Amino acid sequence: MKLTGSFTLNILKHMKSALIIIDREGDILVLNDSAGKILRLDSETEYSGKKSREVLSTYPRLLELFRISFEMHTLPDRAELEIINAHTGDRKTIGYTLSPVFDDESNRLATAMFFKDLTAVEQEETKERIQDRLVALGMMAAWLAHEIRNPLASIKVNAGLLHKGEKDGQKMQLSDEILSEVKKLDRIITQTLDFVKQKPINLQECNINEIITDSVKKNLHSYHSIDVWYAFSEIGTVMLDAHQIDQALGNIINNSYEAMPDGGTLTISTGLTPSNAGDYVPEEVSKHVVRDEMNIQIVIEDTGAGIAEEVLDKIFTPFFTTKSGGSGLGMSLTQKIVSDHWGFVDVTSKLGVGTKFIVVLPLYRVKN
């Protein structure tokens, strides 16, 4: 595939926004001056037509993002990514948007990335102000959690006592509803605290299939007529933050449950998919793990109500929700946890048919 028209190419080459366009074969269609400057590439070289795996070999995470973008239906919008030069160790945080490139017949030909350097000096003060606000928000959330959870605990205990000693069916139902709402409020508080806190990733040896089955069982008893089907591959022991991954997958699974109030089927599969990141391991965990040439892929699919197209690209936006009483943080937290693990989340959905989430995580194993 080639882009034609010198006028168009000149606009793309000299625009202020950094732009890289790569096609399905891994060929670079556009890598403009701004992108070359951020990535510290030779300004005298013309990169159009060259193989991305050669030009961007020092940025394995960037290559991985482009590769996996062709398997994703919902591409990241206004997301952040830390890229590390594998040769120099130079770190950059970029803010980026991925957009599909189609031909006249709506065939997906390439992926375009628009990005900017968030580590630039002129933006450091803005980032510090944002961080200060997050700290303040975290303190406020912790205070609210403390003040709200105490009366919630009292309500829960008293409602439980009423239910235990009650024989009237209507009153028992009312106490059940109180307990259900208390549980919902407690979950919202927990999600808010988890979202505003900066939790470091604590990699440990675990079994991803066991994490999933445990997560499924936690809340399945609250839902009726939901059949769960597993299609697990034998992946073996991997290095993940088991608690956080359980939380991330649990949010997706609970969403699936809620999408099937009248019953349905939840299908969960695990497997391996090729990685394009080589042996890249983030510096903070490089002493403890090595990277496999494959990624872990988790597919969670339900037969629920589905998500409308105009809503689908907003589900990872913090505080956005279509549910009554929802916090709008569940999917945002899931994306944050997966991203902190250097992975990606994708979602497809069709109204009346169901929703499918795909979670891709690097396959790390313990370093001998």
Image (spheres, rainbow, N blue to C red):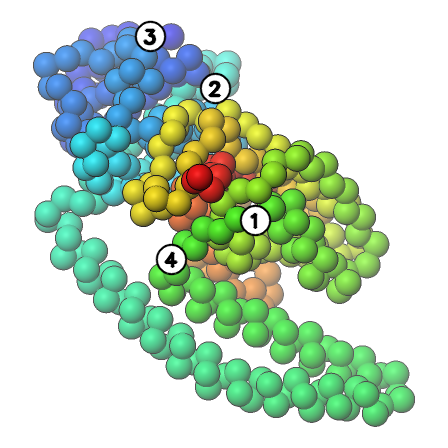
Mark 1 neighbour class, 10 Å CA radius: few under 14, some 14 to 19, many 20 or more: some
Residue receiving disc 3:
2
The CA span between labels 4 and 3 is 43 Å
| Badge number at residue 200 | 4
Check if mark 2's residue and mark 3's residue have beta carbons within 8 Å. Answer: no
Which is closer to the viewer, label 1 or label 4?
1
Give how far apart the Cα atoms at labels 2 and 1 are: 37 Å
Image height of 356 relative to 219, above or below: above
Quarter that holds the N terminus = top left
Q: Amino acid at mark 1?
A: Cys
- Disc 4 is placed on an element classified as loop
Question: Which numbered circle lies on residue 108?
Answer: 2
**Where, quadrant-wise, is the C terminus in this rendering?**
top left
Indicate which label's residue lies in the foreground, 3 or 1. 1
Q: Find disc 1 in the rendering and name its residue.
A: 206
Front label number (4 vs 3): 4
Residue at image coords 10%, 14%: 44
